[in-house]
Amino acid sequence: MSRSYLRTGAIAAAVLALGATAACSGSSSGGSTGGATTKSAAYNAALDGIVNASDKKGGTLNYVASGDFDSLDPARTYYAYSWNYQRIYQRTLLMFKATPGNDGAQVTGDLAKGLGTFSSDGLTVTYELRDGITFQDGTPITSADIKYALERSFAEDVINGGPGATYLKPVLVGGESYKGPYKDKAGLASIDASDPKKIVFHLSKKFSDFNYLMALPISTPVPQAADQGKNGGANYQFHVVSSGPYKVETYQPGKLLTLVRNTAWKQSSDPNRKALPDKIVLTEGLDPADMDQRMLAGSADLEVEGTGVQPTAVATILRDPSTKKNSDNPSTGFTRYISIQEKVPPLDNVNCRQAVQYAADKVALQGARGGPIAGGDIAGQMLPPTLPAYKKFTQYDSGSDNTGDLQKAKDALKACGKPNGFSTKIATTNKGKGPKVAIALQAALKRVGINAQVVQVDASTYYSGFIGVPSNVHKQGLGLAVAGWGPDFPTEYGFFESIVDGRAIKQAGGNSNYSEFNNPKVNDLIDQALATTDVSKRNDLWGQVDHLVMEGADYLPFVADKALDYRNPRLTNVYISKAFGMYDYVNIGVGS
Amino acid sequence: MTAPLDVEPSALDADPDAAISAESAKAVEGRSLRQIAWMRLKRDKVALGGGVVIVLLILTAVFAPVLVSLLGTPPDVPHGNLIDQTFQIPKGSFGGISTKHILGVDPTFGRDLFARIVYGARISLLTAFLATFVTVLIGTVLGITAGYFGGWVDGLISRVMDILLAFPLLLFAIGIGAVIVVTDRPILGLTGTSLSVAALIFIIGFFQWPYIGRIVRGQTLTLREKEFVDAARSLGASNRHIIFKQLLPNLMAPILVYSTLIIPTNILFEAALSFLGVGVRPPTPSWGQMLSDAVSTYQIDPTYMVVPGVALFLTVMSFNLLGDGLRDALDPRAGR
């Protein structure tokens, strides 16, 4: 599950151990067919079409980034852009389709020939592997390499930071007690790799999203021989073995990552990747404003973190038609919201929570996020528009101009027994846009007599140690908290599980359901949806979850995140991946 | 005390007789050091100008609520309608300057910039003055003690000064500030803005006292050997009398000059800490914080950077000019 503040560029690695950031899904709001329509450069052209489609090989791609990856180890990385970037040089069992539009959120076979086949009881999943798949030294990839890679995720004492253990433990038979291959040489019996061309999973419960798990970097094959000694385990991230068309040439963390062609990779084994450039250079550790300048000057091709350009560049790009046509404004799949804690009086009363919902000035909150382009669209519900079950609605009307319905807020306050308002606190990180959001909320609530004090906490401990610990939230009376959330993989389960399933509340810390929302009906619906394979029925169930969550008034969503991205006009095959909400790095090439 | 010799030399040179008759018309009257200094200061128009600006600034800070009610809107009230939604900068030219918002509004929120500057002056001046007071108080007390008593007392205090002077002040300030600014607990009963202001005063004030302490100690060392101190001592005066009645009045000039010169330094220091995000917490306005905020948009909304920048510049320059003038007036022998 994702904590969106990591997308602000100020990346706090400390949160990762708890499963911090993640993939998110991008979208074009229009009903694109997902066909590979070729387009010439225009504003938002890459949302549902391929800009400058080409098969021309050669050249050097110059990517830039402000920070470093959390890890190059496929089992340990949790940044959304890192997952996207790994697709260039690593292969996974399945992958998100390398196509624009809605199809980009679908999974397809990568190392596997196709999606898994479920047994009739839904508890056994089988994948068949392609022919000709090899590591960078030419050794064939077998199912044992994938089994071993997945098992590594269970060794949380060595392989920490990634999502593997969180997702796989409850799903695989015997997963809860398995400690990983370093301690348990026998391996996990529920992953069957007895046939080198076939991998079979035995599930402990029905899990309709299993294919999506296999598209995460955790299923990148790892040769057991390379994961030994001083170059293995926690240090494997500096000695990763490539399975895709490129391999790591040099990696200087925080400075430089260069990829060169992996000669052992065969195009015939990989229908998804074009592998156009000869070399891919990623320069890290740059100042965000400097990156914008480089991109506009054409000396850098893309910013890979997908956080969008800075305010100055937004103005520069949009005001000039010749640069505007090289930019896109995708949805990133994150919902920005205020968590209203139902265990903190007087917000334990639903009417008081509703008063906050009505009093909020969504235009000001949107402004604090950066406005409609750099921030996103005003949201009325938690589910992001990038997910299939999304049906737009607004539970709490903020008035005709979205600046808040003060009359309804006052009525709600009366019903709550606090006609003159009350006092509470707004918790936020001290970095990025958090403080601005808190200030905008504070000013809006003041209009109906709700006096909120802003409490700023260092970004590295905010989620893990501050609002993620329920007892701390109660003790300090943190009635309101600024937060953001996006799905790890583009399904409703990937979005909702950690934040609204009352059974997933972690009292000891690392909790993501800050408001401690716990509605048995919602918990039931989640179970039903997971066991439902019919898509429209499942979407209907998730839609009900979305409504019930909003009725509880624990969540005040205000923006469905967007970012303004800039692409160098010389690039070919540029499109936004709907699974990631940023450009798809798999097939980008260099034109003239 | 001897009368000064160089008063109005031009008048004396031009017409000695007239001067003599004028002198004899009045009873011969000695002038106090204070009168002489004031007379010299009055002739220094630049310093006076600085002084006038400072007085205006102090009045502005004191009467901030009144001024803002006349010329703007309260500093925390957002005006979303004045903001261009796409770019999140004020509509109109020059940062949205209008008759209602004479210095425009800030980006994102559309809060009145005039009000924020005026309230920011409160934070700036309050912090700078109180920090200076803390510095001067500690510096003077310890400086006189060290200089007057000498011996092991002097040794101890001087070594403490050496240690503090070797301290990396900025790093320390950022360290403490970073902790204070994100803490959620009350410290000594203070929370929020009052806590950060108190912390700033402590950081800025406490660690700078050795500078003035050394000056005072040096002066005291010279003064305590002077005849008038010997005379007082031989007449049986107590240490207390000698320190407060004999030494302190003679130390006032350097202390005053030094104070006026560290106030602008402290204003800049406060701005620097707020710029780095370890000063006062938003939404409390502060000049440094505004400058830091303006960095991301200065190319598209330069007004937001120019306004607090000019305010800071004028304030610091005024204090420096006044301080220089005071030094010239109080101690004409010192070279610049």
Image (cartoon, coloured by chain):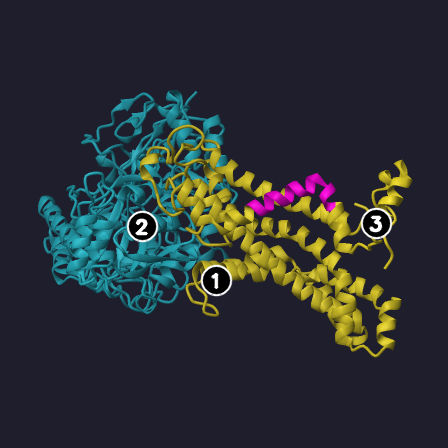
Chain colours: A cyan, B yellow
- In the displayed structure, does residue A281 sit left or right of residue B43? left
Residue matched to label 3: B333
Residue matched to label 2: A441
Dot 3, how many residues are within 10 Å of its Cα: few (below 14), some (14-19), or many (20+)?
Answer: few
Task: Name the residue nearer the viewer: A3 or B83.
Answer: B83
Which amino acid type is shown beneath numbered disc 1?
Answer: Leu
Q: Position of residue A469 (x, y in %)?
A: 33, 65
- In the displayed structure, does residue B251 sit left or right of residue A287? right
Q: Work out whether residue A282 can be spotted.
A: no
Task: Name the residue nearer the viewer: A24 or A558.
Answer: A558
Task: Name the residue nearer the viewer: A511 or B180.
Answer: B180
Task: Name the residue nearer the viewer: A352 or A251.
Answer: A352
Asked which secondary structure carries label 2, the reply is: helix
Dot 2, how many residues are within 10 Å of its Cα: few (below 14), some (14-19), or many (20+)?
Answer: many
Dot label at residue B195: 1
Look at the magenta stretch and give its main secondary structure. helix
Q: Which residues are magenta?
A: B41-56
Q: Position of residue A222 (x, y in %)?
A: 38, 51
Q: Position of residue A584 (x, y in %)?
A: 33, 35
